[in-house]
Image (cartoon, grey):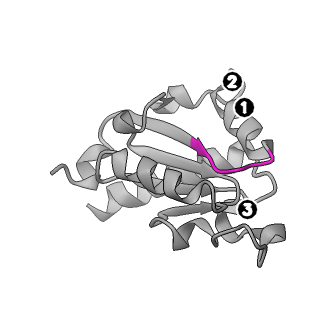
Amino acid sequence: MQSIDNKFTKSLFVFHAACSPCNNCDIEILDCIAPKYDIERLGMQLVGSPRHADVLLVTGAVNKKVVHRIKMIYEQTAKPCVVVAVGSCACSEIIFRESYNTCGPLDKIIPVDIYIPGCPPRPEAIIAGLAKYIKSRKNAG
């Protein structure tokens, strides 16, 4: 199995999973791939299948209809996979806390490596969070 340090020596493939979001975080993720921020210049690219993903970006509050789907998506990713909770809903459920339909923050469902809070987080924060984690993993090895 490939170590996580070796995984960061190549371009990262990112899969975006939306768990019942309001779409504000999704729009900011799309801004990350737009020409102004262009995360592809940093070696990150969105992919359409979790089987090709090195990074799993998750947005929205995990509810009862989505909880088994996000577990299935996580199981389909190649290990090791970096899981990123993007937005306050994924990090802490914010306004949906103690709702009858939510299943807790994302870290109660699958292991989370990076938390990027904000409602919604700016593209700069998303890129900085990913870059800081990559740099910390490279320096740890």
Amino acid residing under circle 2? Ala
What residue lies at 47% left-to-right and 29% top-to-bottom? Answer: 47
Left-right relation of 26 to 72: right
- Residue at which label 2 appears: 34
Label 3 sits on residue: 89
Main SS, magenta region, reads loop
Q: Which residues are magenta?
A: 17-22
Q: What residue is at 64 percent from the left and 50 percent from the top? A: 19
| Residue 117 appearing in the image | no
Type of amino acid under label 3: Cys
Q: Secondary structure at mark 2?
A: loop
> For residue 18: magenta?
yes
Q: Residue at (70%, 60%) from the top-left corner?
A: 61
State the CA–CA distance, disc 1 to disc 2: 5 Å
User: Based on the displayed image, in which of its 4 quarters is residue 107 positioned?
Assistant: bottom right
Near mark 1 (Cα within 10 A), the count class, few <14, some 14-19 or many ≥20, is some
Residue indicated by mark 1: 31
**CB under 8 Å between discs 3 and 1:** no
Q: Residue furthest bottom?
A: 98
Tell me the CA gap for discs 3 and 2: 24 Å
